[in-house]
Image (tube, coloured by chain):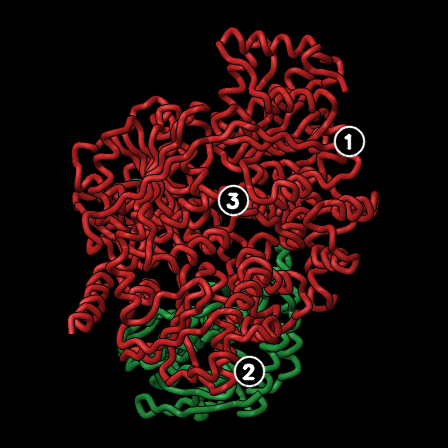
Amino acid sequence: MTIITKDITVRHTIFTLTNQRALYWKEHETLVVSDLHIGKTAHFRKAGIAIPSAVLDSDLHRLQTLIDHFVVRHILIVGDLFHAENNTDIDQFQRFMQANSSVSFELIKGNHDRFKDAFYQTMNIAVFKTHKDIDEVRFVHDEQHCDADMFCISGHTHPGVTIKGRGKVFIKLPCFEVSEQRLILPAFSEFTGLNTKRTVDYAVCYGFTAKSLFAL
Amino acid sequence: MKNVQDSPGYQIIVDWMHEKGQKPFDFQLQTWNQYHNGYSGMVVAPTGFGKTFSVFLAVVIDYLNQPEVYKKGMKLLWVSPLRSLAKDLAKAMTIAVEEIGLDWEVEVRNGDTPQKDRRRQERLMPDVLLTTPETLHILFTQKNNSRFFKTLNCIAIDEWHELLGSKRGVLTELAVSRLLTLSPRLQIYGITATIGNLDEAQKVLIPYEHIKTKRIVAKEKKKIEIVTVLPDEIEVLPWAGHMGVKMAAKIIPIIYENNTTLIFTNTRNQSEIWYQQILKIEPDLAGQIAIHHGSIDAELRNWIEDAISDGLLRAVVCTSSLDLGVDFKPVDCVIQIGSPKGIARFMQRAGRSGHSPYETSKIYFVPTHSLELIEAAALKQAVKDKRIEAREPMVLTFDVLIQYMVSLAVGEGFNETELFTAIQKVHAFHYMTEEDWHWALHFITEGGNTLKSYEEYHKVIIDDEDGLYKVKSRRIAMLHRMNIGAIVSDAMLKVKFFSGGYIGMVEEYFISKLKPNDHFILAGRVLEIVTIKDMTVLVKRSKRKSAITPSWLGGRLPLSSYLSHYLREKLSESLHPKTTEKELKFLYPLISQQEKHSHIPKKDEFLIELIETKDGHHVFMYPFEGRLVHEVMAALIAYRLSLIKPLTFTIAMNDYGFELLSDQSIPIDEHSIKTILSKENLMEDVIGSINASEMASRKFRDIAVISGLVVQSQPGNRKNNKSLQSSSGLIFRVLEDYEPQNLLLRQAYTEVFNQQLEEVRLKEAFERISKSKLILKFAKSFTPLSFPIKVDSLRQSLTSEDLDARIRRIRDDVMKEIQI
């Protein structure tokens, strides 16, 4: 796994974008991720749809590599940590957290996070109902809780970008969607689709592959 | 052999027919005799000659002769591919039964059957049940369903040629296999129109050695008269496109000359456009013409079908939705808009007119673009030569097998060894290995090969008490029942009036591009979107005259190999047409242009055109093998070229040829072309190119739905199982990464090979090319042959208005150059 990074400056704050579906905020030693959808594959399996759980293994492996690489102290999840009901995937995530006991986990609740707050607390995850503010930056799941005066970092849409080449070549990649007011994170889980509709027309998209990260 | 004519049952039926002024056709008599003697088999007869009554009355006669053998409950199970077919057949059978004086119940069961009727049927099945393969499989998921079928004496598969060649055919084969285990003395009958592989068709339906079979072929033949509708001048016909609305004025007089005309179009989108166009040209026809296609509300369709039968309509614009079905007596004329793409389909459609047995069927062919005139000439020749395509049965469709296994597990449960023995006898799974079987068992119980990675997956479990494979979870059972069938469509949304009233369905893909207050056309009406919720589009009537028409994906069929053979022949003759071939003579100006700027390939030639535009470098090749084969060939050629030099291509194709477009120059010259088109290492290179393309992923879409990996959301259903939504593309990727040995994945590749790529056809094509003289031409601009490919490939991204403008511009360019 190769971690490619790119620093961007918004309102005098430096954020590090990575090609591994996560953003690192060095100043606060915080890794920001969104839409992990843990439990999705198990949820499918329970409904009789055979999706291998190796998908989760690979997601968590990626998260571990990022933690080790940046020496992360805090992980902030901007929504959709758990996909549906309590299942074995969540047990696996709990073991993952225990193995990383030095890292604090915080969650801004997304539309999929339907457990009671107490459930997260027993797992040692601090929960924010709608948003969390750090300095001038507001973290939310979707845009309805953004504040016009603050820079807003969110998830929810699973942004993707289509690259069109001459001779009608189409390639779809996950991306960070960045505009003056907002930054939207790609979905962290690989078992998610892509949404190529932009929320704002003039947004810059940082698309990435296993080996590169570039603005489009 | 006993002779049915000596039996009292026969006498009753013949007397009854005599009263109505009818007597049995020879093939009907033969069928009765054969059934009487315990045979199974296949009845081959054209529509309009009472093929229904061949098998139906055979059972009635047998019952009249020995009622004591028949038990209370279902005696005859009638499987037909279309719901609408069942309804009308049931009507005809009920009348017959009443007139003969039998106390039989004849009933239909399908997705439209009301709940209370189903419950009643489940208490006591009617004597004759008419249903579809899907509904039959849903019956298999009921508790204690075997009691429904224990009394069964005969199963008839109507329009077997329509089912054969698709996964619905495999569903049918599996159903027959199960019914045989429940009712061992079952007699099996297929009823089919003429196809190229009748022997095989029978073997697929009845592969059982212990069953005696015979085939009955009606001697009665339909006469067909084909008339090509030509425009006043060749310029009227566009070079490309498949709508052809400019020809609409030409068919108005035809509509007026006849009582009732069926106007067949190839896509739902085209039918909507033609319906609008006809009304625009001839407003007087309002109220006398109707539109009929698969996305229109069933009730409305039923009404239209009744109106045709009653002779209330002058014309109906339709799609393959009216290919099959009961005879519409008043229909005396059929118009085919655009190429029917196959000889069998063309003949089937022609047969929809002139239904009395000895009448001639008249069909008008309306070309939608100039080159279709060659197809018209080819069709005429093919019909004259009586060359009808074969329908290739599908084999080793593990998705259907898995669906069937789960259906049985939801129903009564199955025994591993018994089911394996039964499945191996089914034609589609003759060559299934024991290993494959164990994989399938493993898949439905454990999910995949590595046990650990499928924890919590307990779709099917082995019952501790009786050792049967069963589904215990109610949710899984419910999801499975919703998903039964082998017809996969895109997510569809219901379209309803805000004030109430259901209009039809559109694809989610189409609606996703529209907003409230946007307008579109459905069922010939201009509608305005009010709001979209719960998989339903609420609309109101709009006063606007025009709007965009939904494009339903799919639907455009590829050219059959038989027809393409004739097409090449006619094209090569086109420079010197015979005097009788007015289509080719008419086309001469265009043909001579092609010859002047490039070349008309003769029978023993293969044409390659190189064109450079500001879009990039184009290569056009013309194998005339149909769109699907061209897609494979294009990918293969692109792959071989990329071995010479790293290049990226985009690919476009139609039924005549394909295009490779690249932003860099393409290394094709007199020398390299031979290697690029070589037949050496063909299959190896094809494998290389398929792996690099998305064809398998696309094939996997249907497989994922049929095998239950993707949950289809039901139109209008509030519970759309949102948390279980995922795309087949995503699952394809996940399985490729984590479970590459998955048999369903392998099936996707095999399907690309067997159907899309048609290995045999591809090999033959390259064999032919290798013997042909290769003609390499550099053209300055698009030629009459290349232009349609160019334009078709534009369709996806541009709206109709821009497209037309663009076509005009490109065409003007070409014309300008020609003048110079």
Point out the tag, 1 or 3, that comes first from the N-terminus.
1
In the image shown, does A24 or A213 lie closer to the viewer?
A213
Tag 1 subunit = B
Q: Which mark is residue B184?
A: 1
Residue at image x 57%, y 10%? B100
Q: Nearer the viewer, mark 1 or mark 3?
A: 3
SS type, badge 2: strand
Q: In front here: B752 or B816? A: B816
Residue at mark 2 to residue at mark 3: CA–CA distance: 71 Å
| Crowd rating for badge 1 (residues with CA inside 10 Å; few <14, some 14–19, many 20+) | few
Q: Is residue A28 left or right of residue B609?
A: right
Nearer to us in this view, B197 or B40: B197
Find out whether the residues at labels 1 and 3 contact each other: C-beta distance under 8 Å: no
- Classify residue B296 by image quadrant: top left
| 2 or 3: mark nearer the eye | 3
**2 vs 1, front mark:** 1
The picture places residue B5, in percent across and down from the top left corner, at 67, 12
Q: Secondary structure at mark 3?
A: loop
Q: Is residue B657 above or below residue B705?
A: below
The answer to which of B357 and B512 lies nearer the viewer is B357
Query: In this structure image, what is the colour of chain A?
Result: green
Q: Which residue is mark 3?
A: B388
Residue highlighted by disc 2: A104
- Provide residue B624's location: percent of width, then percent of height: 44, 61
Q: Amino acid at mark 2?
A: Ser
Disc 1 is placed on an element classified as: loop
Residue at 47% x, 68% y is: A193
What amino acid type is highlighted by mark number 3? Answer: Ile
At a point 49% along the width and 69% down the height, the residue shown is B772
Residue type pointed to by label 1: Pro
Q: Colour of chain B?
A: red
Vertical comparison of B53 with A153: above or below = above
